[in-house]
Amino acid sequence: MIRIGVVGTNWITERLLESANAVQDFKLTAVYSRTHEKAEEFASKYGITKIFTNLEEMAASDEIDAVYIATPNSLHAEQAILFLQNAKHVLCEKPLAANATEVARMIQTAKDHNVLLMEAMKSTLLPNFKTIQNNLHKIGPVRRYFASYCQYSSRYDKYKEGIVLNAFDPKFANGALMDLGVYCLYPLITLFGEPKEVKATGLMLDSGVDGEGSVLLKYDDKDAVVMYSKITNSYLPSEIQGEKGSMLIDKIHSAEKVDIHYNDGTIEPLTVEQSHPPMYYEVKEFIDLIKQGKTESTTNSFENSYTTMKVLDKVRKEIGLVFPNDLI
């Protein structure tokens, strides 16, 4: 059994734990929260035996083997490094950190202490993403990748009332690019590697984060177009265009349906059944890697996480999005 502690008690942690129920050898043993009351409430809900309100104590504890970090983006690097230094494996929510400098430090710390560090990017570990990878050759030379993730945030209503919640607060390294744009960019980089050029535009909100944006990315033989938003909805599928046909992906962040539309008008359904909740697959990958004694995922690899963060940094520079973490 791999004994897991969770850092952060929000809805995303609850979603992950629901998915982790079906993962063999996942044993939830500890929780950290800033307040004892919140930690206790969370612990009683999930039958957790160990409560921490001090991160250093948790990192040093011999009652956990690994942690799942689901705190604000601005805290990821500092917290992950603490656990890695204490030889604990780390599954850290996406985006892995606030900038590429932090990601580089996290990766180096994981290597120094010979432990696993993995970004909790669910979409690239889904069965249907593997289907995309395995069937990409059928559409011929790829010339364009288009991905859209635009989802109106319920917190934006509060924002318009003058209440700035975490989702729209730059001190937490948040905003549309970091929360949703990353879901479009990570699969792109997993499939095609680092782009040669990045051009971006976005709408900055008064709070100092972006509400929506678009990115153009250039490769030697193809280009990519990415759109993301937390202040509007979109119902467009994502698409990979090849010279022989186009692969349609209904949702880039969850890939529930995949088809190839060939130039001759025929359609080949590629969807495979994803029999578990989306977050199950990232947890299974994490646990399997630990059991196998591996310190890096081949899919959510150090290179993919670092390259994605470098692209996010370039986009932020283009649109003028600065986080306090950049100034440290």
Image (spheres, grey):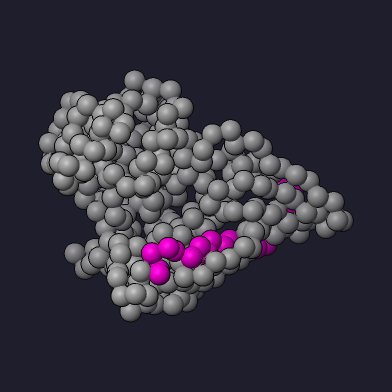
Q: Quadrant of residue 308?
A: bottom left
Q: Is residue 300 left or right of residue 100?
A: right
Look at the picture and state if 151 lies above or below 126. below
Residue drawn 54% across the image and 66% down it: 233
Percent of width and height locating residue 191: 57, 50
The answer to whether any part of residue 107 appears in the image is no
The answer to whether any part of residue 72 appears in the image is yes
Q: Which residues are magenta?
A: 136-157
Residue drawn 60% across the image and 48% down it: 255
Percent of width and height locating residue 143: 67, 62
Residue drawn 27% across the image and 38% down it: 42
Question: Is 138 within the magenta?
Answer: yes
Q: Is residue 148 left or right of residue 116?
A: right
Image quadrant containing the C terminus:
bottom left
Q: Is residue 284 left or right of residue 144?
A: left
Percent of width and height locating residue 40: 20, 36
The tally of labels here is 0
Closest to the observer: 188 or 24? 24
Percent of width and height locating residue 202: 45, 75
Residue drawn 72% across the image and 49% down it: 259
In the image, farthest residue toward the right: 264
Question: Is 247 within the magenta?
Answer: no
Closest to the observer: 8 or 83? 8
Image quadrant containing the N terminus:
top left
Q: Quadrant of residue 157?
A: bottom left
